[in-house]
Amino acid sequence: MVAAAVMVLLGNWQLDRYQGRTEVNEQIDAGQRMTPAPLADALRVPTGGAGTVGPAPAKDKVWTRVTVTGRYDPTNTVLVRGRTVDSRVGFEVLTPLVLADGSALLVDRGWIPPAPGGATAQPPVPAAPTGDVTVVGRVHETESGAGAVARRDGRLEIRRIGVSRLAGELPYPVYGAYLLLDEQTPAADPVFKAVPVGHANNWQNFGYVVQWWLFAVMALFGYGWVARREAHRAAGIGTTPVPLDRAAEPTPSASA
């Protein structure tokens, strides 16, 4: 009974995960279809000084499609290493977009392959457009486990996109999320590949729900079967009877 109860709780936990991942997938799909909104509709302006990071987006604003105009700061371009697109390992390129108020939004301009020599060899980065640039993209929350920010050959490098980590290396306040670029004016360099947005595997969690609940039913069924067998054994049902003619025979005496 305890095992069945634990299995039901595990099934409920997986059900919560299924519902959460389904909600994320629906947000991703809705973001792809929606008309771009102003940046202020999804993210609050950072109010601190240089090197600080603004508030993170509300849960329902993640994956919102937004548009914003500013100027790229290529001197603080960030290379995000170890990123895979189309089964190839390369770099994603983040470039701060500095807005009119002096704050900056990190824009993931896309993926580029490494230079010859290996997956960690820094590639030449296509130049960012000069002057005012209007970008359209989807709000992506900061990634966990970013690790330390390194400088190599004069460029910032990081393993995962940790906005707060990167903000400390930049000379302006930074928004609390980054933008996954869909399009920009002037157009982006064709060497960039769009970073695909993967959907969460919610059906795997649904399968676990069914699995744990079936295990709970099997545990209860097994308990009932064992209890019934023990009850029959205690009542003598199913035991081999002793023949009456043999039971009536006297036991031979030692003298006989």
Image (spheres, helix red, strand yellow):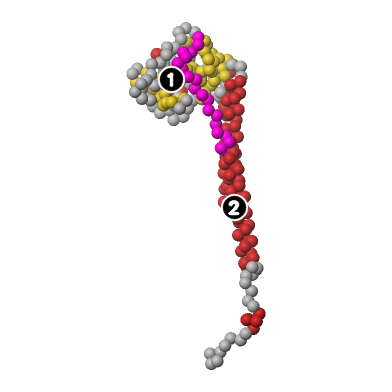
Amino acid type at image mark 2: Ala
> 249 left or right of 133?
right
Q: Residues within 10 Å of mark 1 (few under 14, many from 20)?
A: many
Residue at image location 42% in from the left, 12% down from the top: 127
> Residue under circle 2?
219
Residue at image location 42% in from the left, 14% down from the top: 126
Magenta residue span: 186-205
Measured in 3D between alpha carbons, the distance from the residue under mark 1 to the one under mark 2, in whole angstroms, is: 53 Å
Q: In the rendering, which numbered label is found on residue 112?
A: 1
**Residue 49: in sight, yes or no?**
no
Q: Quadrant of the C terminus?
A: bottom right
Observer-nearest residue: 214 or 149?
214
Q: Is residue 136 above or below residue 5?
A: above
Q: In the rendering, which numbered label is found on residue 52?
A: none
Q: Quadrant of residue 243?
A: bottom right
Expressed as whole percent of the image width and height from the top left, the position of residue 233 reads: 62, 67
Amino acid type at image mark 1: Ile
Observer-nearest residue: 194 or 230?
194
> 113 left or right of 35?
left
**Residue 89: in sight, yes or no?**
yes
Q: Based on the picture, tell me whether residue 208 belongs to the magenta stretch.
A: no
